[in-house]
Amino acid sequence: MWEKVTYAATQAGSFEQAARDLWKLAELDISDQRARRAALHIGQERVTLRDAESAAYAALSLPARRTSPVDQVPQVACVQMDGGRLQIRERGADAAQPASDGCWREMKAGCCLSMVSEVSAADPCPQLPEMFVDPGRMAQLAREIKGFSADAAAEESPPPEAEPPPDEEPTERPGRPHPLARSVIATRRSVEEFGPLLAAAAWARGFATALRKAFVADGSEANWGVWRKYFSDYVPILDFIHALCYVYAAALAGRAAEEGFRIYRKWAQWMWSGQVDLIIAALVERQQELGAPAEDESETSPRVQVAKTLGYLQNQRQRMRYDEYRRQGLPITSSYVESTVKQINRRMKGTEKFWSQGAEPMLTLVADHLSDTPVLHRFWRDRHARLTGLRCYHQAA
């Protein structure tokens, strides 16, 4: 019964909807408040167990952390992390000092992905895929990337090309790794507390002894702080899409749409081929043409766009060897964790949704249900023993 109630409370859009689903599908008549209390109770149990596993990992010696606790080690181990936002209604002393952005607070999510791929002698896909030179798609990507402003450039871009027929399947990119299983970690806690949770989850999956390991994230310094402290033996990879949108912005900044897109295509191919230094040299030349931006200059001005992209690429250039990553069969985008954040948002985020003490338990339950690994199966199997100290025996038929 507990399992059914918590499942409904996690999958439905609200506790009210969970109560209706339970009545319709299981003929279980409980109130929405009862469903909420049950879900938060079980969620807190999962938080306690998750924290205990993280503490046990932190207590391991360095040699022990380099071993695998499981026999099945993935061919490719990939860790990705990203952030999201949800509304928190503060209680007590915190409520007296409202934040500048209202009730919106940050949450963090991470994915531990086991993958399969082949190592190639040469770049299996040296040519930039057509999807990244489609004007309409690039304008859409530019608008969606957080903190990126290219509205004017996007409006001036050429119209999108015709889409393929619905029954035509997109061509699979050669050398792209295929995911097998995903573990998800989500929390409202600080990045300093999130790092150990993610590291413990990766270790439990046997990632420490994988022959090929990758850490993929966008350019946020918080992400790379976690990489340096917990995943420094993983190949660091900057998300290709984020970098591409910066290049797109700089190429179109201060240029006519046709000329800007022609330069963008050249720069995008350079980046796809791992020739980031060529783009940096071109941006240095472009910055000299435009001049340095003033301190109070608009974020959308061409000089600011070029300066931002130049700084971004200079800081991240060692994580942008995309031709080598494809040769090794490693992922080059953080799309898996970004998709995971959107799935978490379906339950946790909304203009009408406010959380207080229940955010962390619910985030943990949502992450558990998104995981392909049997974390919840083991939780329910062992719960009776944890509560009573007795093993739960099942009578044979």
Image (spheres, rainbow, N blue to C red):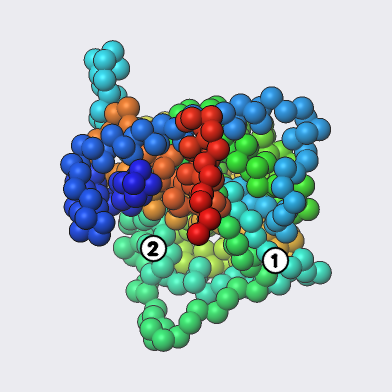
The answer to whether residue 92 is above or below residue 358 is: above
Query: Could you say where residue 164 lies in the image, as x and y percent from the top left?
Result: 41, 83
Instruction: Work out whether residue 198 or residue 160 is closer to the camera in this orientation and state it.
Output: 198
The answer to whether residue 270 is above or below residue 22 is: below
Dividing the picture into quarters, in which one does residue 223 lie? Answer: top right
Residue wearing tag 2: 139
Residue 300 in sight in this render: no
The answer to whether residue 198 is above or below residue 192 is: below
- What's the CA distance linking mark 2 and mark 1? 31 Å
Q: SS class of the residue under badge 1? A: loop
Q: SS class of the residue under badge 2? A: helix
The answer to whether residue 251 is above or below residue 362 is: below
Name the residue type under label 2: Ala
Name the residue type under label 1: Ser
- Earlier-in-chain disc, 2 versus 1: 1
Dividing the picture into quarters, in which one does residue 153 lie? Answer: bottom left
